[in-house]
Structures are given as structure tokens and as C-alpha cells.
Image (cartoon, rainbow, N blue to C red):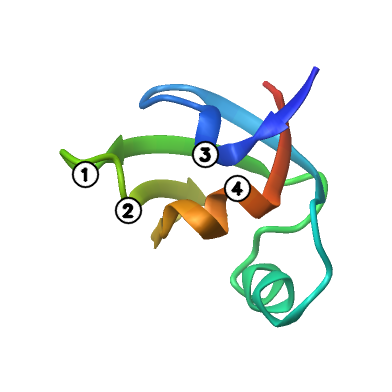
Amino acid sequence: MTQSLASLVAGQSGIVCGFTQDDGTTQRLMQLGIIEGETVDVVRRAPAGDPIEIRVLGYSLSLRGTEAEIVLVTRA
């Protein structure tokens, strides 16, 4: 089942399977290592839910909710 990265909760993981758009933001996310086939772990969310902290390729990264909505994942 495909869902957005933003829909995962802390402690869940997903495998990147695509993006909802192809623009500058998507290119930046890919440069940061969020590419198809990579496993992304949701570490935690801010109290208001935005931003979201993820772990990818061995490092932590914080994304805005709008950025996390672009990333499509399947549950790992």
C-alpha cells in the first residue's frame, strides 16, 4: 500500500517508492538521499506535528509536512 511519508508515525519505517510531483523540492529531497528504494525511518515529530524528523542513509533530517507529503512510501 502506498502512502505519503507524512502519514507515518514515530517508530514506523517506509521504503521510498516515488514522489507526487517533479519540481525543485523533489530534486532537493533526492539530493538529500531520499531516493527510490531507500528505507526511511520516522524518528519523531514536533509537538504540533511539523516538522518531522526522519533517518535516511544513516543521518537525521528534518522535513516540513509539505515536503513529507511529496514522498510516497510503502511500509517496511
- In the rendered image, which residue does mark 2 sit on? 51
Choose between 76 and 8: the one closer to the eye.
8
Residue 64, position in %: x, y? 42, 59
Q: Which residue is mark 4?
A: 69
Q: Secondary structure at mark 4?
A: helix
Q: At 70% across and 29% down in the image, what residue appears?
A: 3
Q: Is residue 27 visible?
A: yes
Q: CA–CA distance between discs 3 and 4? A: 5 Å
> Residue 26, position in %: x, y?
72, 70
Alpha carbon separation for disc pair 1 and 2: 6 Å
Give the residue type that dot 3 points to: Ala
Q: Earlier in the sequence, mark 4 or mark 1?
A: 1
The amino acid at mark 1 is Ala
Label 1 crowd (10 A; few <14 / some 14-19 / many >=20)? few
In the visual, does 39 lie left or right of 50? right
Is mark 1 in CB contact (under 8 Å) with mark 2? yes
Q: Position of residue 30 (x, y in %)?
A: 71, 69
State which tag comes first along the sequence, 2 or 3.
3
Marks 1 and 3, the one that precedes in the sequence: 3
Disc on res. 6: 3
The residue nearer to you, when weighing 20 against 42, is 20
x%, y% of residue 66? 52, 57
